[in-house]
Image: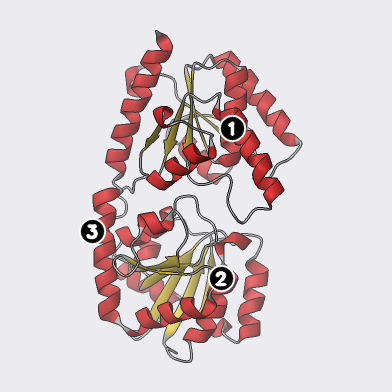
Amino acid sequence: MRADGYAVWLACSDDADARAVARHGISFFPVHISRSISPWDLLAVVRLYRFMRRMRFVMVNTHTSKGGFVGRVAAWLARVPCIIYTAHGYTVHAAQPRLVQAFYRLLDNWVGRRTSLFISVTERVKNAIIELGSARADNSICICNGIDFERFAPAALDPLRIAARRQSWGVDATTVVIGCASRLVPDKGLDLLLAAFAQVLPHAPHAMLVIAGEGPLRAALQHQADTLGIAARVRFLGWQDDVPELMACFDLFCLPTLREGFGYVFLEAQAMGVPAVATAIEPLTETMTHGETALLVAPHDVTQLADALTRLVLDPTERRRLGMNGAVRVRQLFDQRRQLEQLAKVYHQCVLNAER
């Protein structure tokens, strides 16, 4: 869009990811948007409204449940001609209390009537928001998220760097590394992963669990590892920047998440040829196929999770099979170049319609 002469802005909370985007030359407007509902949301709406009125945008594309609501309200108030919402997951889900579900459904349907176009990252998400009443079939499309295969390219990595990184964790030639990369927050199921790993070790003492990421649960998870007596076989790495190289250091990837928007991290692991173990929740059941490209287990089931991990730790042939199948499927369905081409066409059409 910038190549065609359009001004492109990013508006979101000021964090490391936003600043990384800004360093690529994208204009950045910082506005704090909390994950939970807060009185400060009104301030975010007002700031965004004033910004949008001043800039006179012809199109606004919002993301995430909370940012999508705040951004669309501000865009509607600012009379932006084309308002797009990209749905990465479900605003309303079964784990919420019924009153919360009803309240969110009310908000979703209200702001949905003020949305020009819905872009869903999977077909199931698209169908769900139509069934919810937020969107209509005639203003909803699906554009799958994509992986940058120039960045996630196993052949481009230095084997010596990978070996050195594994050695820094205390890994030897016999060690099988179960890797995880995630925010350390409750809905990622990391306490379940530690409990399952404690059941794996008696059958596979050569296994090691490596957890990359930061979050409020780090101290509690480290304490849990100590209590379970597995701390010597668990590594907490903190935040890691080089995700492709990190994934290449893992023999298998596991994140027993209890709620997921799209599950980029699983596809990133698979793009590197690393087999994945995940929970059988949407949309992971759409992006991965149990027994063919990954092993999917019931959420909250520690025994089933431990069995799946033990199976892959002890069976290198199965790891290779799932890793190869996953890599092929990711490249077939989740190519970032195709995603960006589709988005560019949608954006250009929306802008043309708005300028008429």
Q: Residue at x 56, y 35 (%)?
A: 68
**Which circle, 2 or 3, is nearer the viewer?**
2
Residue 109: image tag: 1
Among all residues in the image, which is located at the extreme bottom? Answer: 202
Q: Position of residue 101 (x, y in %)?
A: 65, 46
Q: Nearer the viewer, residue 194 or 8?
A: 194
| First reached walking from the N terminus: tag 1 or tag 3 | 1
**Which circle, 1 or 3, is nearer the viewer?**
1
Amino acid beneath label 3: Val
Quarter of the image where the N terminus is located = top left
Q: Position of residue 299 (x, y in %)?
A: 52, 67
From the viewer's perspective, tell me whether residue 125 is left or right of residue 332: right
CA–CA distance between discs 1 and 3? 38 Å
**Which circle, 2 or 1, is nearer the viewer?**
1
Amino acid beneath label 1: Asn
Does dot 2 land on a helix, a strand or a loop?
Answer: loop
Q: Position of residue 51 (x, y in %)?
A: 60, 20
Vertical position of residue 208 compared to residue 9: above or below: below
**Which residue bears the numbered disc 2?**
300
Does dot 1 land on a helix, a strand or a loop?
Answer: helix
CA–CA distance between discs 2 and 1? 31 Å
CA–CA distance between discs 2 and 3? 29 Å
Amino acid beneath label 2: His
Quarter assignment of residue 344? top left
| First reached walking from the N terminus: tag 2 or tag 3 | 2
Do callouts 1 and 3 mark residues in contact (Cβ within 8 Å)?
no
Residue 301: image tag: none
